[in-house]
Structure formats: C-alpha cells, structure tokens
Image: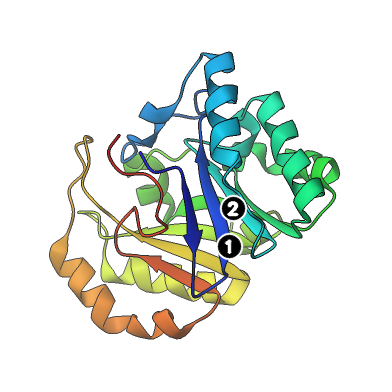
Amino acid sequence: MERYSEVKGKNQREIVLLKAFPCKWGRCTFCDYILDNDLDEEKMIKLNKKVLSQVTAKYKVLEVINSGSCFELPGKTLEDIKKIVDEKGIEKLFFESHWLYRNRLDEIREFFKIPIIFKCGIETFDDYFRNSVLNKGVLFSEPKEVSKYFTSICLMVGIKGQTKDMIKNDIEYLLKYFEKGCINIYIENTTSLKRDPELIKWFKEEYSYLENNQSIEVLWNNTDFGVGGES
C-alpha cells in the first residue's frame, strides 16, 4: 500500500494516505475504501507518523486523505500534521470531509491556522442516484448550498445506471459553483456496483477539455495520485 506520493502538474503538492478510525457514515454502496480503517489507535498513530516523516514541504502544500473524513484521524495524528505544518512552513492543506461534518470545518481551520481546501464526495447532484443508489447520506436542496461549505467536490463517473444527462448536469454545476473539483472514473472493486465502459468512453470524448482546466483533476484510475493500491 503506497501512502506517500507527489502530485505533479496541476496543483502540485505532496499527498499522504493515513489510517483513521471507521468512517462515521460508512454505508456508501460503491466504497470498499473503508477496509483501510482501524481501531488500534496506537498502531495508527505509529504508522501515520512514519508516513508523515516523508513529507518535505517542497511545494509548501500537503494533501491528507484517509478512508473517511479528517475528523476520524487520531488526535495525535492531527498534532503530528500540525507540527510538520509549523516546522516545515507548509502554507496550504487539503483535507477530505463527509457532508455530515459540514458545520465543524472551522474546528480544523482554527487548529491549523493556514488556508485549507476541504473536499467533499458529492459523487453526483442527482439526488436519487446519490442517495438511493450510492447511499451517500448527503442531502441538500441545491448545488449552491454545497458551495457554502466546500470549495472543492469529488464527482464519480462511469457507474451502471448513470446517464449522460446526469453527468452533463454534474459538470455544469461543478464548473459553475466550485473553485476546484476532482472527477473519479469508477473502477470496479469488491462491491456489487458495475462499471459502464460506454459511458466512460463518451465522457472522455465529450469532456477531454477538462484535462486543460487547472482547477479540475480527472482520475482515470483510483491510484493516479500515487497512493493506495494493493497492500
């Protein structure tokens, strides 16, 4: 399992994949990422410290991801990240958070005292597909409501049952309301959801121009950031 890498090209940064407590939601039908969760706090802290020791701050930007939200990281791990931020002069952080924590984001901002980009996995703005099919547990009235809390979102493309119209709307809302975004092309895993190759082919033809948008990152494979994969 790769847990440290560098993201080059767009939004250059270092990235670490850390261990955390179980995802508070943990019911998304497409996700087996939560298998990386743990309950042994001492073990997690030790592993995370080792991963964080590789951070050089060469880009002054660090992204921290885990199998859930940043709020599920051990408190000591957050302190270890803070120490690196302060000692190495990191100027910006990226964290992930589930919609459930949207009213607690300022807790992390106040702790680190540097600019933070919070990513939220919306997956799609189609309410039925998001909550009834993907079981995201993310309820809101309109895309603009999401943008009040998150400047960056993650979308999912290529799951059987999605439509071209859904994806067109998703990209339209992403570009209209959010400063940054990450589009994940679905890769089949241990869950029952299947990939739609034809829809993915259409997306690549229709939205190849997004590769030139410095604010949008398209992950054709879930390890494109250099972390994750088989242990």
Other residues around mark 2 within 10 Å, as few (<14) / some (14–19) / many (≥20) = many
The answer, for residue 37, to whether it is visible in the render is yes
Which quarter shows the C terminus?
top left
Is residue 150 in view?
no
Residue occupying the far left of the picture: 198
Residue type at mark 1: give it. Arg
At mark 1, the secondary structure is strand
Which mark sits nearer the N-terminus, 2 or 1?
A: 1
Quarter of the view holding residue 164: bottom left
Q: Which residue matches tag 2?
A: 63
Q: Is 176 in front, or is 36?
A: 36
Distance from Cα at disc 2 to Cα at disc 1: 7 Å
Q: Is residue 172 left or right of residue 161?
A: right
Residue at 53% from the left image edge and 17% from the top image edge: 43
Read off the residue under disc 1: 13
- Vertical order, 209 against 40 (above or below): below
Image coords of residue 215 (percent x, y): 55, 75
What's the residue at 39%, 38% (across, down)?
Answer: 135
